[in-house]
């Protein structure tokens, strides 16, 4: 017999796949819509924090991620004048979480793992090449119009969850304005091979190097290094991607640098901040980039989106079981507060704190209590404290 309850999830990125899989595993019928004909393979977010690892472990994909990814156990700090200032071990979080580390892996590497699990589930209907058009909520549910190669159709469901990214059509159908505030300048991401380690011996998988206003982040990926450079507003984006500008910028940080490491590729992107005015309208809800955007420093926005997926999916299941929409509304309002009160202020502080960076780092390295508080914040444990430990499969689906 077909399950009477039905949830539609629009958008097959990591947030939508996570939400749909949690819903299906709880025994609720779910339809996942994706306008593309396949998963998005673009290079995007790549840092997974402890609460997110708990969700992915619960869904059974963490072992495969660990086999493919780069685990991060230390954060290293350097300055041009003083060299290696010190390191912080993420193992200091061992009493706070079952996941006292970070994982570096392209998000496009986890979406196939989630999709494989979802497609194997009897309660899941995955529809690629199916674009969300609009939705009309009422007291009993929501009617969704979609378009696929066969034409325009309507679907009926109890709830709709929009996880369709920054240009969300679901958010637009809710009548919510999209007015992101751009951060000044842009971000240059340079991919380099192991020759980077000859230039900067002893790099940790996360290393920060600062000289005055110039800074670089070095992230070890499974198959390369990512060098993250901030591009000032007065520098043309095309020029910023030239070898000459990259070398000039790195020489500010590594004086006397003779040549660049072997560059495998580079791209430039801008960053903006945004939080939707509300995450709900009737029986329509938002999660992930459809609901919030933040600066990329710290890798928090995608992680926050995956936390949205967990809390909204479990609330949808519980709301259906109890016949109480207030449960879902409360979860949406809570996730809105997390983004507005914690996510954006925290990522903003990372951008504006350059002037006091050196003093802050020395304070962290010399004060265990301050250091532990910092690790808890950067691991997002205070944003999702319930996810610090392994999630029991039974209680998560109850």
Image (spheres, helix red, strand yellow):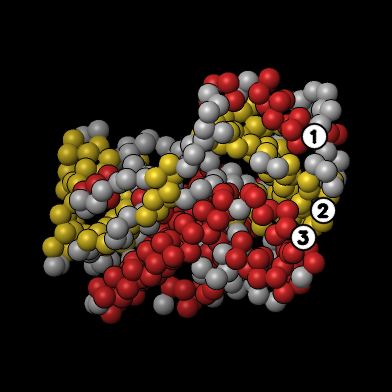
Nearest the camera: 305 or 149?
A: 305
| Pointer 1 or 2: first along the chain | 2
Q: Is residue 273 above or below residue 283?
A: above
Q: Residue at x 60, y 37 (%)?
A: 230
Q: Residue at x 26, y 67 (%)?
A: 5
Q: Earlier in the sequence, mark 3 or mark 1?
A: 1
Is residue 86 or residue 330 the one in the foreground?
A: 86
Q: CA distance from mark 1 to mark 2?
A: 15 Å
Q: Image point 58% across, 69% down: which residue?
A: 381
Residue at image mark 1? 254
Residue displayed at 74% across by 64% down: 363
Real-space CA distance between mark 3 and mark 1, rounded to the nearest whole angstrom:
21 Å
Per the model, the C-alpha gap separating discs 2 and 3 is: 8 Å
Q: Do the numbered discs 2 and 3 sit on residues whose CB atoms are within 8 Å?
A: yes
Crowding near pointer 3: few (<14 within 10 Å), some, many (20+)? Answer: few
Q: Which residue is mark 2?
A: 85
* Residue under label 3: 362
> Residue 276 in the image: x percent, y percent?
32, 55
Left/right placement of residue 68 relative to residue 317 reads right
Percent coordinates x, y for residue 241 in the rendering:
60, 24
Q: Vertically, is 211 above or below 267?
A: below
Counting from the top left corner in percent of width and height, residue 340 is at 41, 61
Q: Residues within 10 Å of mark 2 (few under 14, many from 20)?
A: some
Q: Is residue 244 left or right of residue 333?
A: right
Indicate which disc, 2 or 3, sits on the residue closer to the N terminus.
2
Q: Nearer the viewer, residue 250 or 99?
A: 250
Say what secondary structure mark 1 lies in. loop
Q: Secondary structure at mark 3?
A: helix
């Amino acid at each position: 017999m077909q399950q009477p309850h039905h949830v539609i999830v629009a958008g097959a990125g990591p947030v939508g796949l996570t939400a749909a899989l949690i819903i299906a595993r709880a025994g609720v019928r779910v339809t996942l819509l994706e306008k593309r004909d396949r998963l998005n393979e673009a290079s995007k977010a790549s840092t997974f924090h402890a609460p997110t690892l708990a969700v992915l472990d619960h869904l059974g994909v963490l072992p495969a991620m660990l086999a493919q990814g780069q685990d991060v156990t230390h954060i290293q700090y350097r300055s041009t004048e003083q060299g290696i200032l010190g390191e912080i071990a993420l193992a200091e979080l061992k009493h706070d979480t079952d996941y006292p580390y970070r994982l570096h892996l392209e998000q496009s590497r986890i979406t196939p793992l989630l999709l494989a699990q979802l497609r194997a589930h009897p309660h899941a209907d995955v529809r690629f090449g199916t674009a969300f058009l609009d939705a009309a909520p009422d007291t009993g549910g929501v009617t969704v119009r979609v378009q696929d190669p066969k034409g325009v159709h309507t679907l009926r469901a109890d709830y709709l969850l929009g996880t369709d990214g920054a240009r969300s059509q679901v958010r637009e159908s809710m009548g919510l304005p999209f007015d992101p505030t751009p951060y000044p300048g842009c971000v240059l991401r340079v991919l380099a091979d192991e020759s980077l380690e000859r230039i900067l011996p002893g790099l940790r998988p996360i290393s920060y190097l600062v000289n005055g206003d110039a800074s670089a982040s070095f992230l070890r990926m499974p198959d390369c290094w990512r060098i993250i450079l901030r591009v000032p507003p007065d520098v043309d984006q095309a020029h910023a991607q030239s070898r000459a500008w990259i070398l000039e910028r790195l020489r500010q940080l590594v004086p006397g640098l003779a040549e660049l490491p072997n560059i495998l590729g580079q791209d430039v992107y801008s960053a903006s901040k945004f939080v939707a005015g509300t995450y709900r309208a009737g029986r329509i809800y938002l999660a992930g980039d459809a609901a919030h955007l933040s600066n990329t420093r710290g890798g928090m926005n995608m992680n926050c989106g995956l936390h949205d997926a967990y809390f909204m999916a479990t609330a949808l299941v519980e709301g259906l079981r109890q016949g109480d929409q207030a449960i879902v509304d409360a979860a949406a309002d809570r996730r809105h507060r997390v983004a507005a009160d914690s996510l954006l202020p925290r990522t903003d502080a990372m951008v504006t704190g350059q002037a006091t960076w050196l003093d802050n780092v020395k304070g962290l390295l010399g004060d265990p209590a301050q250091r532990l508080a910092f690790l808890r914040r950067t691991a997002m444990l205070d944003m999702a404290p319930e996810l610090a430990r392994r999630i029991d499969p039974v209680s998560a689906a109850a």
